[in-house]
Amino acid sequence: MKPRVYIETTIPSFYFETRSTPEMVARRQWTRHWWDSAAAAYDLVTSSAVIDELARGAFPSRDKALSLVASLMPRDPLGDALHLALASFNRCDFLLTWNCEHLANANKFGHILRINSLLRVPTPAMVTPLELGGDTDVH
């Protein structure tokens, strides 16, 4: 699994930086170099806070900066986290879901388990109805 990198507001801002002072030019070049050559080695994520900050910004490349990170936002960033938080807080043994992208995903379970462990909350098994068992005859 790729290491996960949270993309904060300044990254897309500096990717499209237009100021010509040496410091700004250098930051733009370093940002573009990292994004264009190293970013693929990571799982990039961002948050609605970053999207909101960029949207409120008043700079020439605001729309380009927003489009750069648009694909890093889950469709419903709060929904999945809220479901997991509620199941964990209420000490559920299972979180039953068909969401195999963000929840019932073996590749993400280690990360979720580590975070919940740091928070000292239990982690439910995130499974589909097929995995949970029971009567497999569908009527």
Image (cartoon, helix red, strand yellow):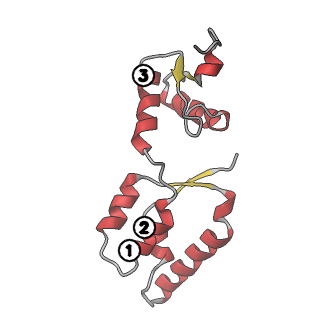
- Pointer 3: residues within 10 angstroms few (<14), some, or many (20+)? some
Q: Position of residue 61 (x, y in %)?
A: 40, 78
Q: Residue 62 carries which label?
A: 1
Residue furthest to the front in view is 139
* Residue bearing mark 2: 66
Q: In the rendered image, which quarter is residue 134 located in?
A: top right
Three-letter residue code for mark 3? Phe
**Disc 1 from disc 2: Cα separation:** 6 Å
Q: Residue at x 69, y 59 (%)?
A: 41
Three-letter residue code for mark 1? Arg
- Pointer 1: residues within 10 angstroms few (<14), some, or many (20+)? some
> For numbered disc 3, what is the local secondary structure?
helix
Q: Which residue is drawn at 61% across and 16% down?
A: 132
Instruction: Mark 3 or mark 2: name the one nearer the start of the chain.
Output: 2
Give the vertical position of 39 relative to 112 (above or below). Answer: below
Quadrant into which the C terminus falls: top right
Q: Position of residue 20 (x, y in %)?
A: 45, 90
Q: State the residue in front, 42 or 67.
A: 67
Would residue 108 be found to the left or right of residue 68 on screen? right
Residue furthest to the top in view is 135
* Residue bearing mark 3: 89
> For numbered disc 1, what is the local secondary structure?
helix
